Amino acid sequence: MYPPQAAIFFLLQDNPRVAGWFLSRQIGEVRFVESLSKGLRELGWQVMVQTARADALRLVEEVVKPSNKKLLSRTLFFLDLTTVTDFYPLSQWETMRCRVRILDFFGTNLNSSKIGGLKLAQFWTPYPTSNNTFLGFTVSKPHNLPRKEKQGLLWGKEPRYFTRHSRLIQELLKLSPLHAVAETFEMPINNTNGSLVTHGLLSPDSWMRLVAKSSYLIGFGDPLVGPSALDAISVGTVYLDCTYTTLRKLESGAEYTSQHPYAQSLGKPFSYPVHLSNLSEVVATAKHVLESPSNLPFVPAGFTSQGYKRRLQLLVQDDFCDEAILHGGHTS
């Protein structure tokens, strides 16, 4: 017998050589999903994760049977932009569609005909957008924070993020030591005094300690809207947000004016916009941060455990279903 409410995550992989959905995702996407599954369990939902296509199809067939109308009305299907296209051709799609929620890390603004007839409000995002539904994720303030050091931290694990910014990094090194987790830099950097410290990839705990010790975290345009910006602010580290010179448009129709518009919207002293092409602006901002008293740790209300849980409790009550669908009829 099914519980009153069930959440089914379809985290499928078309490529059988990939072991699982989580292995092919960035840490931000994983945290987005993990916060949701944990929150649903805390609200009393049964959470099931299907990673095999055959098992997923069998489960869909069971839930959308005409004899299971009550079950369908108490079930939510969670997919992402990649996996949802596998379900469009199914004969059950029209029936299950209103109970589908898309976990969409970057946001979508496409015509309904391109997204299987879904409504844009069925797309749940980690940050507020003008078209989709804001879900968020949880940000926790670590305990026993280390003492702040007068140092900067370069955000990004891949050397390509920094390729065009060797001159800027060289100027920032004149102000303070810099730390990075990229193992190599594909550009010339004069580091004879060892002021640029490269750590290589770190565990999440070690990364957070490094973030907490640093005076500022600076983005170089990617990764887009990663959680590290809010993690930095949560431990009193200032985030310098890379503002784009031209609007960045994604295939999903989402548009970005900076690497992390939400973090930038929190304003000073938590976040400062910077244009990487304007060296004097970036250097002056970093200098100001280094010379200012450290911020207190701050987590926006919507990203606390309580705030997240309250919002999730409301979102799962949203109804996009026509009565005819849930009672076995059809809509035109």
Image (spheres, rainbow, N blue to C red):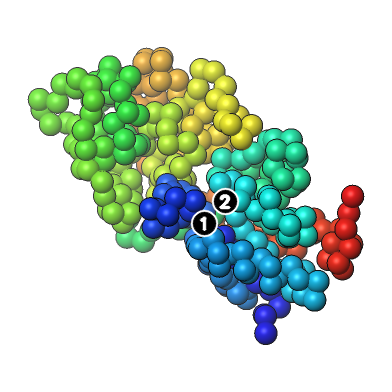
Q: Is residue 121 above or below residue 138?
A: above
Q: Is 193 left or right of 74, judged from the image as shown? A: left
Image coordinates for residue 244, horizontal then vertical, percent: 50, 22
Q: Is residue 130 visible?
A: no
Q: Is 51 left or right of 254, judged from the image as shown? A: left
In the picture, the disc for residue 12 is 1
* Element class at badge 2: loop
Residue at left offset 46%, top offset 42%: 226
Q: Do callouts 2 and 1 mark residues in contact (Cβ within 8 Å)?
A: yes
Q: Amino acid at mark 1?
A: Leu
In the picture, the disc for residue 262 is none
Mark 2 residue crowding within 10 angstroms, few (<14) / some (14–19) / many (20+):
some
Q: What residue is disc 2 on?
A: 83
Image coordinates for residue 116, horizontal then vertical, percent: 72, 45
Q: Nearer the viewer, residue 323 or 34?
A: 323
Separation of disc 2 and disc 1 at Cα?
6 Å
Residue at left offset 22%, top offset 43%: 200
Q: Amino acid at mark 2?
A: Thr
Splitting the image into 4 quarters, where does residue 305 fall? bottom right
Q: Is 155 left or right of 68, judged from the image as shown? A: left
Residue at left offset 45%, top offset 24%: 274
Q: Nearer the viewer, residue 282 or 124?
A: 124
